[in-house]
């Protein structure tokens, strides 16, 4: 206590002494330091991304993570995000200037990445590889989705009435027209904004020439093959099957090049693997080879093949828009061509 009092007294005496030296002038107030301005708290925001799978297949991996991060975090695809399904991804209370990377991988191995996703609220569509118009694999906004049903008549008779309509609406057009023969197929599409059609349910019903009727009332908005089943082939009450009949391709290839063919390949267009050389043992002029395969008609319809050959003299020919079908094909001599195409869909005389 004595020490504190001494300090106070000394300070008082000093003040009096200063007053006497200044001729009793009022002392100037002591300068005070200007406080540094305090930094404002950084602005934050919440990103909400409604991601729609419009890739044409199941998405197995889906990540949204901060640019530069080595940790991608949660896989938002879970056990698989099916086509036309969506998942909402929220990034809460992050700096407003944060940029995210959106990255996805499909079941086939196709990958997509977008590295400048901002903190915002927006729907996003993951695009199919064959739907790209540039390098970007996503699109912003409510995407338009297209359902596709390839309907196969496997009833054993002609179908005279066929309807596919949304629950609670009019049946609409008879899709069978003048009659859909047994073994024929028909592709039916429906489309709309993702926010409106994702949970739609459709009714499919048909009547055959003999009067047999079939219906399925819980058809979802999707892409699928549908077989109309014969009454005596049903294993339960359902008159349809989500399968397609098998289809066969058979190409009878004739060598009419006037020389031996040393290389002959038939492979899916765009593939890096040409597969077997079907002329490895030599394919003589005037001979023919039969190549073919069998698979589901639903997947086969999407195949496009390249037929490529080289003759002994080094002359080469290529045709890269061959479909899954049964057809004769003649390999044409170079001087017999009437255009750029080195094959003809005909059997030699």
Image: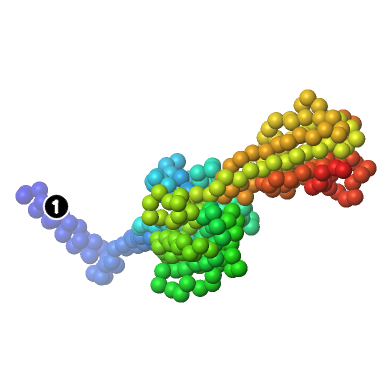
Q: Is 137 or 207 nearer to us in this picture?
A: 207
Quarter of image, res 13: bottom left
Residue at the far right in the pictured view: 335
Q: Residue at x 87, y 43 (%)?
A: 349
Q: Is 186 or 234 nearer to us in this picture?
A: 234
Query: How many numbered callouts?
Result: 1
Q: Is 238 or 140 nearer to us in this picture?
A: 238
Q: Residue at x 62, y 53 (%)?
A: 130
Residue at the far top in the pictured view: 281
Question: Whole-percent x and y of residue 321?
Answer: 73, 48
Quarter of image, res 19: bottom left
Position of 66 compared to 310: left or right? left
Q: Residue at x 64, y 39 (%)?
A: 293
Position of 154 compared to 256: left or right? left
Q: Residue at x 76, y 34 (%)?
A: 289
Residue under numbered circle 1: 7
Q: Is residue 187 visible?
A: no
Q: Is 285 or 138 nearer to us in this picture?
A: 285
């Amino acid at each position: 206590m004595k020490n504190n009092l001494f300090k106070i007294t000394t300070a008082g005496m000093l003040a009096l002494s200063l007053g006497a030296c200044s001729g009793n002038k009022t002392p100037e107030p002591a300068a005070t330091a200007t406080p540094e301005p305090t930094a404002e708290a950084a602005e934050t925001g919440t990103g909400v991304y409604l991601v729609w799978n419009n890739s044409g297949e199941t998405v197995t991996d889906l990540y949204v993570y901060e640019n530069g991060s080595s940790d991608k975090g949660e896989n938002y695809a879970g056990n698989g995000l099916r086509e036309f399904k969506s998942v909402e991804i929220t990034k809460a209370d992050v700096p407003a200037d944060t940029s995210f990377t959106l990255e996805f991988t499909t079941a086939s191995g196709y990958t997509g990445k977008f590295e400048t996703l901002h903190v915002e609220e927006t729907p996003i569509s993951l695009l199919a590889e064959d739907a790209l118009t540039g390098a970007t694999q996503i699109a912003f906004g409510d995407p338009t989705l297209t359902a596709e049903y390839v309907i196969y008549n496997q009833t054993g008779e002609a179908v005279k009435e066929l309807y596919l309509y949304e629950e609670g609406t009019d049946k609409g057009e008879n899709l069978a027209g003048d009659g859909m023969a047994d073994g024929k197929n028909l592709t039916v599409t429906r489309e709309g904004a993702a926010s409106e059609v994702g949970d739609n349910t459709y009714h499919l019903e048909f009547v055959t020439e003999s009067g047999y009727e079939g219906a399925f009332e819980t058809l979802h908005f999707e892409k699928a093959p549908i077989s109309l089943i014969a009454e005596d082939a049903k294993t339960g009450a359902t008159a349809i099957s989500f399968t397609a009949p098998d289809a066969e391709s058979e190409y009878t290839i004739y060598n009419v090049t006037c020389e031996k063919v040393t290389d002959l390949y038939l492979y899916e267009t765009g593939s890096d693997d040409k597969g077997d050389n079907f002329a490895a043992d030599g394919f003589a002029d005037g001979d023919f080879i039969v190549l073919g395969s069998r698979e589901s008609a639903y997947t086969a319809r999407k195949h496009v093949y390249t037929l490529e050959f080289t003759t002994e003299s080094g002359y080469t020919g290529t045709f890269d828009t061959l479909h899954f079908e049964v057809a004769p094909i003649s390999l044409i001599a170079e001087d017999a061509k009437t255009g750029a195409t080195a094959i003809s869909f005909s059997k030699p005389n």
